[in-house]
Amino acid sequence: MRRPIIAANWKMNCTTGQANELVNNFKALVTQVTEVDIVLAPPFTALATVGQLISGSNIALAAQNMYWEESGAYTGEVSPGMLIDIGCKYVIIGHSERRAYFGETDETVNKKIKKALEHNLTPIVCVGESLAQRENNETQAVVVLQIRRGLQGLTSEQMQKIVLAYEPIWAIGTGKTATPEQANDVHHFIRRKLAGIFDEATASAVRIQYGGSVKPASVDELMAQSDIDGALVGGAALKADSFARIVKFEA
Ligand code: PEP
């Protein structure tokens, strides 16, 4: 079976002081959790603080983005080596907010995935359709294109090191969650595509998170679905008790 993975995307929230309080409260609530990979992705400015607070615990550190070069004249960017240096194990790549506001494309996603893997950083790769695309029945076409282009040139072995996150854009930060069945249908579709692009073993090994307004009240039903292996959580991860309840889902 695939090991569940629940990740918090703090987005552009939390000073170091706020991070300190949030992580200390959260950590105390999840010390007994051993069956779930727990990941926190604070903003770059809080990585060091959070990394120190969770050192030696059952919680891993992630960045929300990275650049695909090792170093050099790339003002404002952060390299995979820098993320490893500060203790990151994961990096979110291709979040829909980065695609919408910062020019991220499937091609840049592909470059970032390859460079992250070179550094043994686990990419959490986001895909998902807009509301208009869903209403036009384009969900599958959009997601398959993001997968084909974003994952282009990867070996099966590399693919098995990646976590995918299906995040319908219309459900992110809106309070609208895809129904568990809607989400699972897309997860199942993605897994069938992975079987075609790679192979059956890869398709059944890859973990696919759902993201989009996951809350304590919705997580159990989502996690009970056959092809949903975890959650990527924004808003509800900014409160220690609500994120702890999500991590302690009952499926
Ligand atoms: C996200 O940031 O990836 C996300 C799913 O946010 P929210 O849970 O707030 O919808």
Image: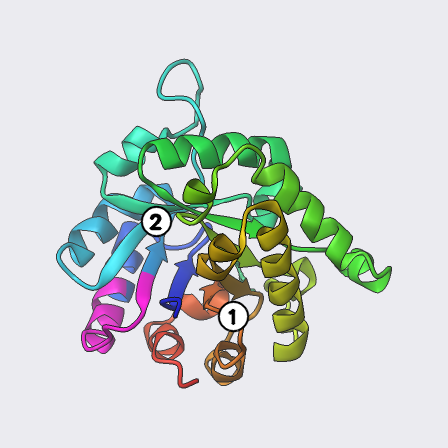
Amino acid type at image mark 2: Ala
Q: Nearer the viewer, residue 199 or 168?
A: 199
Which quarter shows the N terminus?
bottom left
**Colouring convention used in this rendered image of the protein:** rainbow
Give the residue at the far top of this rendering.
73
Q: Dot 1 lies on which element?
A: loop
Indicate the position of residue 40 as horizontal and vertical percent values: 34, 57
Q: Residue 70 colored magenta?
A: no
Mark identifier at residue 228 = 1
Label 2: few (<14), some or many (≥20) within 10 Å? many
Mark identifier at residue 243 = none
Which quarter shows the C terminus?
bottom left
Give the residue at the far right of this rendering.
136
CB at disc 1 and ligand 1 closer than 8 Å: no
Tell me: residue 215, above or below residue 108: below
State the residue at coordinates (41%, 67%): 237
